[in-house]
Amino acid sequence: MRPARPSGGAAAASWAFAALGGSLLGAALQLQQPRLWSAGAYAALLFAGLAGLAVLSRRWRWHLRMPAGLAMALALACGALAAGGLAGWRAAVYAAGALDPALEGRDLQVVGVVAQMPQRNDGGTRLRLDVESARWADGRAGAAPRVPARIALGWYREDSSLWGRATEGRAAAGDAAALHAGERWRLTVRLKAPHGNLNPHGFDSELWLWEQGVHASGYVRTGARDAAPARLQSTWLHPIERAREAVRDAVFERVADARQAGVIAALVTGDQGAIDRSDWDVFRATGVAHLMSISGLHITMFAWLAAHAVGALWRRSGRLMLRVPAPQAALAGGVLLAGLYALFSGWGVPSQRTVWMLATAALLRLTGRRWPWPHVWLLIAAVVVAVDPWALMQAGFWLSFVAVGILFATGFMRPAEEAAGRSARLLAFFREQWVITLALTPLSLLLFQQVSVVGLLANAVAIPWVTLVVTPLAMLGAVAPPLWELAAWAVQALALLLRWLAALPYATLSMAAPPVWMAACGVAGGVLLAMRLPWSLRTLGLPLLLPVLLWHAPRPAAGQFELLAADIGQGNAILVRTATHSLLYDAGPRYSLESDAGHRVLVPLLRAFDERLDMLVLSHRDSDHTGGAPAVLAMQPQAALSSSIEATHPLQSVRPARRCEAGQRWSWDGVDFEILHPAAGDYLSFTKPNAISCVLRIANGGATVLLAGDIERLQEAALVSRAADLRADVLLAPHHGSKSSSSAAFLEAVRPRIALVQAGYRNRFGHPAPEVVERYAAQGVKLVESVPCSAVLWRSREPGEVGCERERNARYWHHRLP
């Protein structure tokens, strides 16, 4: 007998499932491209994929006669072509709006509308501007400059802007406070292409700006020779942003404690920047950060509550019940209200993804389609990726995607629960939150290399407290402002508990970032443990988790060492690793009053490698070398501190520093470390901090590295005269390649193969100086700069080779120098 062929419905379900899976695969493959093709090439792929899917969807008898495997393979290929073509075509069209490199660093006068509510802090104001027109600031004739449609600007205070000083900006201290969403302004600006820091396992700010539609960033010029910023008029544009701004400002006016006001403002308007950084640290340590921002889970919870409220009200009207059944009205109302909430909260990318997920699932149910949950799951993901292909590169997408899959797999959508009583539904809701928390724990370890051990306990209290008390009070406060004071009390009570939990020993668990195959196994194990299966089957998830839990990042062999020069902008930060020890040389800059290289780059980097620093060496006191030190020292309580900072420096109260002096030596795993500068007498005669930069020499008998800090010509000459042998394979270019350093005599004594320059993109100092670049070239030295290279990896076993993060993991949205 012939084997029974699948029915038409079964075949359609099979190829549809394959097509949905193919769409995700196609978009994922397109996101791996280092460079874009032409828009026409992507359009051809899109047309071919859609045509193939159209043929498969109509020729039922034809593909019923085909082998099932071939039909699914064709559907998979067509789905991949369509999704990859759509993502690539959108990217190519969007990339055409990039900032002309010739406009970088030039003064322009732009007229535009403030597109989002401004973000104000002690250092100034940040804003997004939709540009309507642009011209040269000096009034020159000729063609008008072509400026991207949306730009991100900083309007900085003269007395407190570290960033402003680093970019030559002179900001007016009062005018930015008068700027509001929806207003049309004329501003003199200086722009640059979005160029962010790229580090292993680090945040990709260039992708984030790409998703936000921002093609250029810069700052407002308000110097004596610049035309004064001018408010031209209020417009009807962006009314929701103006309303959000009014509510946020009203919260801060009503609530005396700024930290409590920041949490309330974040829950109502989605302004996550309003929450104090120290509070974010507590929320992450206790695993409740998802509750304190309007994330995908937050929108989902709001939709769930809104649907039940709409259903309860709908059932009170017999006429409405006859027109539309209450379950359908509740479902549509919940999604609609969730969409409005997401819109009012800023329509951020995570909120958008969640709304599309909810709308897709609701539409299937309203049309009476009872697809198997894996089909619905893939359809939801395919819709989200079609709207935002770059979501596949974001941790938030995978958290939401896996959470939705867990809800389906554990039966959250069962009709029996919909018909249950109110108390049963409430218990089911909290049960699902617990299941999601448990199941997402492995994924959190994989994405963030950290999970809260106290998270289950913290969420058991925080989920009902924030969902049923804090958030309703915060939102109702927009109508009755006195309720914000009650919400502030509720926030304070929760904060006391969370700070106590965060202070407990081993409140968080960290681990190194594992390979991709281990990541997939860990997620599968977590989902299997959360599913409604017999425990004999659930326990099969434990072996899948073991590779992730037991993973250790590879380290150099005994007698070898490696350097990772982190991409931190204008400053120094170099991680040195041996077989069992680690040292961090400098801790990068402080970017602003709220941000530094420690929190933004070094802490995540050290966590991703599961590093326990033995020593932090701060070459000298300048902020581009010590700015991230407080965050690093807080994360690494066991690390010794060695530096040339003075006894009264604020860091001495964080951790007493041992003074670095020439002659200090130690050995780790067959690798020798030696301080070459400063000598004890140099501390008595130095005129500026650069003169007493700690110079560290690292050698294993086969390769040598010289980390020179910010020494200048006089200190270079002293080193040449004191040291018997300065030769090194790798040299950290003194003072970031400043023209006051890297003298010919010093380079002749060191004779490096490779010189590293850690400097910021378009930094105001002009590092590295052109004459210094020529000097290194004349010596035959390979100059490796952090701007085109980003993070730099060097290993002693291959002393002539370096790896660049921007080259190794190149993507088409990454900025490339012209």
Image (cartoon, helix red, strand yellow):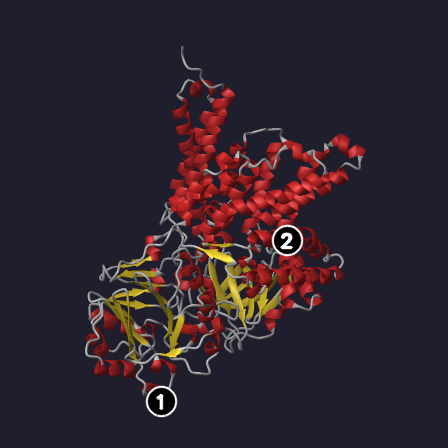
Give coordinates of residue 214: x percent, y percent.
49, 56
Query: Would you name the residue on which mark 1 appears?
Result: 684
Can I make out residue 492 in this image?
yes
Q: Distance of mark 2 from mark 1, alpha carbons?
A: 58 Å
Query: Would you name the residue on which mark 2 appears?
Result: 461
Q: How many marks?
A: 2
Amino acid at the residue labelled 2? Val
**Residue 354's image quarter?**
top right
Q: From the viewer's perspective, is residue 183 above or below residue 29?
A: below
Give coordinates of residue 234: x percent, y percent.
65, 62
Instruction: Find numbered disc 1 in the image and state the secondary structure of the residue it sits on.
Output: helix
Give coordinates of residue 243: x percent, y percent.
67, 57
Answer whether labels 2 and 1 touch (C-beta < 8 Å): no
Circle 2 packing at 10 Å, graded few (<14), some (14-19), many (20+), is some
Q: From the viewer's perspective, is residue 178 above or below residue 128?
A: below
Which residue does the image show at 69% across and 33% down from the upper left?
A: 419
Instruction: Find numbered disc 2 in the image and state the secondary structure of the residue it sits on.
Output: helix
Which residue does the image show at 51% across and 46% down from the upper left?
A: 440
Locate the N terminus and report the quarter of the image it occupies.
Answer: top left
Sequence-wise, which precedes: disc 2 or disc 1? 2
Circle 1 packing at 10 Å, graded few (<14), some (14-19), many (20+), is few
**Residue 414's image quarter?**
top right
Q: From the viewer's perspective, is residue 346 above or below residue 403?
A: below
Position of 518 compared to 471: left or right? left
Which residue does the image show at 46% across and 59% down from the upper left?
A: 146
Position of 328 compared to 290: left or right? right
Q: Nearer the viewer, residue 356 or 600?
A: 600
Position of 667 compared to 461: left or right? left
Q: Nearer the viewer, residue 589 or 811?
A: 589
Give coordinates of residue 527: x percent, y percent.
50, 40
